[in-house]
Amino acid sequence: MAPERRGRLRAGAGAPEAEARLRIAVPSKGRLREPAIELLHDAGLGPETPGDRALAFPCRNAPVEALLVRADDIPEYVQDGVVDCGITGLDIVRESAADVVELVRLGFGACSLEAAVPTESPARTLGDLAGARVATSFPRLARELMPGAIELVDVHGSVELAPRLGLADAIVDLVSSGSTLRTNGLRSVGRLLESEAVLIGPAQPREDAVQLGGVFRSVVDARGARYLMLNAPEVALEQICALVPGSRAPSVLPLAEPGMVAVHSVIPAADVWRLLPALEAAGASSILLVPLERMLA
Ligand code: AMP
């Protein structure tokens, strides 16, 4: 567990008005910063655009104050009540071992923690790395998730260079497309953890932090879905309904033209490319796809 921060007052402690505002930590730089601010925007909070050097920014439409903090520090800040909740990578949360709860997964910053070796290495599986020297900036996760005992080489930044420098036989690092591994003559031998950005709160989160998690979830779910509208001959209805995934009960509306109906349904965004030609082939016409803003179960 991350050591408790001592002698540190909650920002705004003693000021009742400041206390009422929900303080959310947002990564101050790196690849999670902009998507996190965009999420606040899409959730309708109306974040003021922070300048490059801003340390905090308010939201116009909600009693929420965003504090820009290093992504690595966010789990500890949340654990210690310096902020009420925070957005950071699941990998960072797990490595910190801070006493926090995951309120919602946010669908961006997807990557995985993987073990990799130089292309010419005989190692093929994670098990082959028993006893190997492993360079990583995730020592806790590497020790916890690698199957055998390993010798850890703690490095910060440019982990991929460690095998070439003779410092290690393998690395454990974050991978998204795999191109950085390939560029550095490395090959993955196994995945240890799937990660994405998450909203975290302290063990006993404030009610408004939990509510904010629900709002974020409705945005994240809506981003992964599309509203589909189409017209079709009534005789094609059965075939069209069978094609539309998850639409046990699509809305079917009669059209002014006899024998024609309109079908409305929510479909996964990832299925669109496959579905549209199939729907057309089944007789659908005037197909419209509309993005969704929120989805509540
Ligand atoms: P950064 O501040 O840009 O180093 O990124 C910090 C976080 O972004 C990581 O802890 C991950 O949660 C996430 N992330 C997503 N894709 C990657 C990637 N390919 N490499 C490193 N971090 C990634």
Image (cartoon, helix red, strand yellow):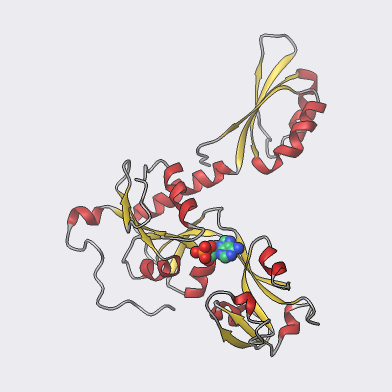
Compared with 286, 108 (above or below) is below
Residue at 70%, 68% (x, y): give it. Answer: 183
Residue 130 at what x, y percent from top left? Answer: 71, 87
Compared with 23, 120 (above or below) is below
Quarter containing the N terminus: bottom left
Residue 221 at what x, y percent from top left? Answer: 55, 45
5 with respect to 37 (left or right):
left
Among the 4 quarters of the image, the one containing residue 149: bottom right
265 with respect to 18 (left or right):
right
Residue at 41%, 40% (x, y): give it. Answer: 44
Compared with 220, 169 (above or below) is below
179 or 222, which is in the foreground? 179
Residue 5 at what x, y percent from top left? Answer: 32, 76
Residue 278 at what x, y percent from top left? Answer: 80, 32
Can residue 155 be seen here?
yes
Among the 4 quarters of the image, the one containing residue 159: bottom right
Residue at 77%, 76% (x, y): give it. Answer: 119
208 or 293, which is in the foreground? 293
Tally the numbered discs: 0
6 with respect to 42 (left or right):
left
Can residue 195 be seen here?
no
Compared with 188, 212 (above or below) is above
Among the 4 quarters of the image, the one containing residue 274: top right
- Ligand 1, what quadrant? bottom right
235 with respect to 43 (left or right):
right
